Image: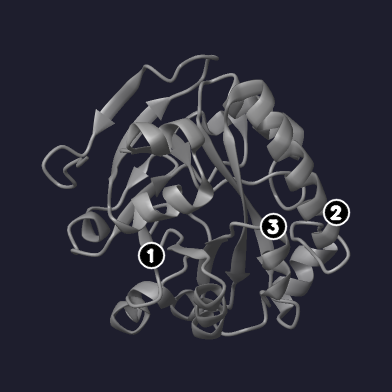
Amino acid sequence: MADFHTHTTFSDGTLSLPELIDWYGTRGARVLAITDHWCQRTTPLGRMAKLLKRTLTPDSLPRYIELLESEARRAWHQYQMRIIPGVELTQNTLSHHRSAHLVVLARNGWDLAALDPDHTPLEACMVAKRLSMLVIAAHPVSTGKILHQTYHLWDNRKLYAPYIDAWECATQERFFPEVATSGLPVIANSDFHSPRQAEAWRTRLNLSPAEAETLSIGSLFDAIRARRLQPVLTDWREPKALARPRLELAGLIPATG
């Protein structure tokens, strides 16, 4: 079981990075990507996020990467859980249709420093691809909630399809049928900000025994790109709740492997 979209107190999450790792580790997760917001610096909404301490900054990014590296070693030793370093490039404008969130995952945390939140989404995708990062379109359609929506990637999905490895077909407790049935590669994530989101969509990866033993980041990226996964609605309110998936997307996204 894996979750590739989560947040800590480095942006707008309620748990510190070590607390988030312990929360997932005690629930039996094997793969966790930590993807705090990195907002545009030049827009009013981006400057507001910095003022409210809801975003990574050039000053906090090195501390974030260093803590990711040290906590990744602890997570593997304590829980046999692989930590993937990432960020959520966050471009919010007053228009929902010009706003985009890209989850970018790296094999090496220091590669994240090559990204620039002020790049256009397409420029960011190109940089990520050049560095063999994995790119996920975050909540690309309506979330059904009263919050800022991010439609730019979905509105321009033909343009972005060659650069985006997976599109979120579910986040938190919300399922997006238009994404799941689009023919695009998909993934499900919790977009975790708080333990209140214990019941949420996550992803089961179908790995070979060798892949499951090492959980190398490269093999995990390969599994996502090959669509060897199954979105699962999970209830993780209690520790060791891994064995309690509630609902799978049977028939829409068949598991392989």
- Residue 14 is at least partly visible in this image: no
Quadrant location of residue 40?
bottom right
Q: Circle 2: is it few (<14), some (14-19), or many (20+) Cα within 10 Å? A: few
The C terminus lies in quadrant:
top left
The N terminus lies in quadrant:
top left
Residue under label 3:
109
Residue under label 2:
63
Viewer-proximal residue, 39 or 136?
Answer: 136
Q: Are marks 3 and 1 in contact (CB under 8 Å)?
A: no
The residue positioned 62% from the left and 35% from the top of the image is: 194
Q: Secondary structure at mark 2?
A: helix
Q: In the figure, 17 relative to 97: above or below?
A: above
The mark closer to the camera, 3 or 2, is 3
Q: Earlier in the sequence, mark 3 or mark 2?
A: 2
Residue type beneath disc 1: Asp
Which residue sits furthest left?
Answer: 251
- Residue 106 is at least partly visible in this image: yes
Q: Are marks 3 and 2 in contact (CB under 8 Å)?
A: no
The mark closer to the camera, 3 or 1, is 3
* Residue 165: image tag: 1
**Location of residue 50 in the rendering, given as x and y in whole percent from the top left corner:** 80, 65
Q: Answer with left or right where residue 256 lies relative to residue 22.
A: left
Q: Secondary structure at mark 3?
A: helix
